[in-house]
Amino acid sequence: MNDAIIGAIIAAIVSAFVAIASLAFQYLSKKAERADRRDERLSEYQEWYRRTLFERPLSAVQAGYGWRQRLYDAVILISHDSSQVEQLREACRQARDWYDANALYLHDGLPTASAFNGLISAAASRTEDGRRIFFEHFDTLKQELSQRAKQLLSLEAVRAAGETAP
């Protein structure tokens, strides 16, 4: 065979090998890039889960406890100084607005009845019977908030344990 033909055949074989190697390298590179993006999305989803399904509800529980105390302070204040009616009304309005925006986080779903709502309504009533009901809801709400916090913390512990499991 002619040297030129042999050279052309060798060049064609080398070119085909280089092209195949280049395609294989591109495929492996894109596969690794897709795996990196998948891992990044998984990390983002885990962060979203932690923020949305743990931190936000836990923060709502903590704020709910704060509102419970503010309403208590307002009810006690008005029992000593009846001129503070407007302060009590404003506290009840703000607590209602806050609760309406956070009820889903305080409960595992939307509640049909809530000690928080009962607490607000009883605080606003300003009657002796309303005060009695207020303190019943005050104690019940403390139990509900404590139970929800324990539930959230145990769910987070299970989730965290699942992340560290091999």
Image (cartoon, rainbow, N blue to C red):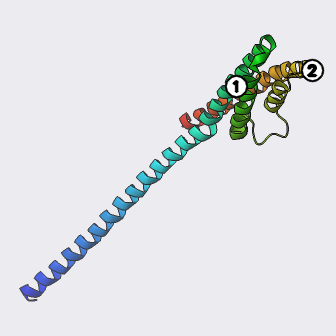
Quadrant, the C terminus? top right
Q: Name the residue under label 1.
A: 67
Label 2 SS:
helix
- Point out the residue furthest to the front here: 83
Q: Which of 41 and 60 is in front in this view?
A: 60
- Mark 1 secondary-structure assignment: helix
Q: Which residue is drawn at the image coordinates 81% and 13% (left, top)?
A: 79
* Rendering coords of residue 40 (x, y %): 45, 48
Residue 129: which numbered mark, if any? 2
On screen, residue 21 versus residue 111, left or right, reads: left
The answer to whether mark 1 and mark 2 are in CB contact below 8 A is no
- Please say if 51 is above or below 127: below
Label 2 environment density (alpha carbons within 10 Å; few <14, some 14–19, many ≥20): few
Q: Nearer the viewer, residue 26 or 156?
A: 156
Eye-nearest disc, 1 or 2: 2
Quarter placement of the N terminus: bottom left
Query: Mark 1 or 2 closer to N-term?
Result: 1
User: Does residue 66 show up?
Assistant: yes
